[in-house]
Image (cartoon, helix red, strand yellow):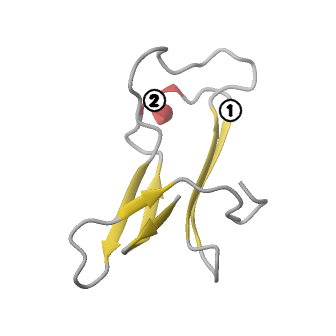
Amino acid sequence: MVAEGARITAITLAGTDAASRLADGSQVTEVTVGAGNEGAVSVVTLSSTGEATLAPNATSTVAIIEVEFAKGQSQPTLHFVEGLRGAARPV
């Protein structure tokens, strides 16, 4: 996720539907930094055994993102992108 006209300052799973369904899986959710890598990534596996899912055909929250607006910007634009690199590998 990248922000145009803003800077992503935080991303969390806390308080989301994904967090409430996280069973024996794992998650990495972090702000990314560096030239061409500014944004946020989140990789969530709810369960390694397939026992946890989000509700089908429903809206679910999977992350909460905080942004800091650039001066003069009233509404940032957020974009999904591939290839941002967190502490581990590109997502």
Amino acid carrying mark 2 in the image: Ser
Residue at mark 2 to residue at mark 1: CA–CA distance: 12 Å
- For the point 37% across and 73% down, the residue is 6
Q: Which residue is mark 1?
A: 25
Where residue 82 appears, as percent x and y from the top left, is 67, 55
- For the point 40% across and 37% down, the residue is 16
Callout 2: helix, strand or loop?
A: helix
The quadrant in which residue 50 appears is: top right
Residue ranking furthest to the right: 89
Compared with residue 70, is residue 29 higher up or lower down, i.e. above or below? Answer: above
The quadrant in which residue 91 appears is: bottom right
Crowding near pointer 1: few (<14 within 10 Å), some, many (20+)?
A: some
Give the side of residue 78 with respect to residue 45, left or right.
left
- For the point 31% across and 81% down, the residue is 70
Looking at this view, is 6 or 9 the one in front?
6
Looking at this view, is 45 or 38 the one in front?
38
Where residue 26 appears, as percent x and y from the top left, is 67, 39
Where residue 20 appears, as percent x and y from the top left, is 45, 29
Query: Does label 2 or label 1 sit earlier along the sequence?
Result: 2
- For the point 60% across and 19% down, the residue is 52
Looking at this view, is 5 or 28 the one in front?
5
Q: Which residue is mark 2?
A: 20
